[in-house]
Image: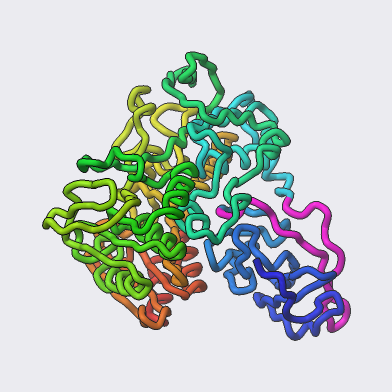
Amino acid sequence: MQNELKGPDLGAGIAAADLPDGGMITGHANGEAVLLTRRNGELFAIGATCSHYGGPLGEGLIVGETIRCPWHHACFDLRTGEALRAPALNPVKRWKAEQRGDRIFVGEANPDSGAPASAARSRLKPGLQSVAIVGGGAAGNAAAEMLRRRGFDGSITLYGAEPTVPVDRPNLSKEYLAGNAPEEWIPLRPPEFYKEQRIELRSGRRVTGLDAGSRKLTLDDGSSAAFDAVLLATGAEPIRLPIAGSEQPHVHVLRTLADSRAIIAAAQKGRGAAIIGAGFIGLEVAASLRAREVEVAVVAPEEIPLARIMGDEVGRFVQRLHESHGVRFFLGNGVQSIGRDSVVLNDGRTVPADLVVIGAGVRPNTQLAEAAGLRTDKGIVVDEFLQTSAPGVFAAGDVARFPDRFAGREIRVEHWVVAELQGQTAARNILGAGQAYTVPPFFWSAHYDVVINYVGNAAGWDQCQVRGSLDDRHALVAYRSNGRIAAVATIFMDIESLEIEAAMEAGDADAVEQIISRV
């Protein structure tokens, strides 16, 4: 979080000429950081720090009457301070701002900061009394919160298979695993929040059956209940490779808080770790374990890490980055067997390891939907409003296969921000908003001091163009399919990433090309 107050004292006033229409100034008032902007002649003053991870909103992008955070693309309403889009869930403050003569002053904070506009709260579907959410991850939690934020007063039941409150899953492979994030950062909300919001949180409870017609759920304890609407946010499960010895207690996957805690416990007493898989999770785990001074070896069948997703140049850059921090790579290889203190590779070599983490990807949890007769195709198929083939049953997050407007095809992605945004959109549509999901996919991946931001979906790309310098940590990578931009990755080019996201959301391919061409 950014605690140091910078910029002018906005309470004492600034010259009006210093803030042109569309401009932003970060300063402070009454001991708090404030972002002041002018849009179409109207003044707005809101908190200058993103409520997610503390990103500087003054370095973000204004789109209409919203501002987007440069770090993880959260979006806030300039007029109310409401967190309109995840990953931020909490609002930012707003202050009164006015121009008197040739000077602009920021006054008192508004007591109703973050409250949605009354119009947004009034559009509720008639007769809707109860909503069930199956899945206590990013999408499920975001949906439950949005239902209440939009004025739904009926019952909300959130079923989570994990025996905890919903947690900040990205942290499990990043800062928390590295030892840089305290335990209190991990819950998305404390248990008291769900009680205050009258969200019945049923942790450690699995839904085993769904009657899609009556929207009746059956639980693993034999109980059942029917609801007016159901959201399936069942997520995905780690793929467990059929390797000899993989059932041993020192062999882990990483999906849950319990998984992350188990790896941390093993790292404290381990002398070396083998990561099987060189995807994003595997490499983030490698970076986090190196922060704990564990010797790390990465084993993967591909010749270049991340090449299929990010291209050869980015993959080699990421490999060099990890190698500079002491990670050893055994690429073009696989694991034949896992012993108590080593793994045997397919080529016969032995790698010492008393901690093994398998990062071979995930598989969507579609079993409940399939048994209910919902349409599935490598995920639960939904329309642009995130409704499944059964009326009143919605799906969101890792499990949902949805139409991507910019790509022009159905996709399924496993991104945290996408899951939260879809949960929020599904909640609005359960309430009758009729809001199409149009936000292009976004994710970030952290490797030591390098963060890669990625907007779009480039599955099956056929051309990769690097602009700028990867080694200088200032680059944009454009992925094309049949000559058309499909996705863009950036390293420390945050404003370009935000601009590209906004252009993709608007369906403006020409604007995307213009942004890329100026780099």
Q: In the rendered view, does 256 fall on the left or right side of 79?
A: left
Residue 150 appearing in the image: no
Q: Is residue 406 left or right of residue 167?
A: left
Q: Which residues are magenta?
A: 87-114
Is 268 or 475 nearer to us in this picture? Answer: 268
Indicate the position of residue 145 as horizontal and vertical percent values. 63, 41
In-image side of 153 versus 315 (left or right):
right
Tell me which residue sits at (18%, 52%) in the image.
Answer: 344
The C terminus: image quadrant: bottom left
Residue 273 in sight? yes
The x, y position of residue 64, in whole percent, is 61, 64
Residue located 63% across and 29% down the image = 200
Quarter the N terminus occupies: bottom right
**Relative to the observer, which residue lies in front, 450 or 413?**
450
Which of these two is toward me, 347 or 3? 347
- Answer above or below: position of 102 versus 499: below
Q: How is the image coloured?
A: rainbow
Instruction: Residue 386: give x, y in percent of width and height.
Output: 45, 39
> Would you place residue 205 above or below residue 48 in this image?
above
Q: Position of residue 315 (x, y in %)?
A: 29, 68
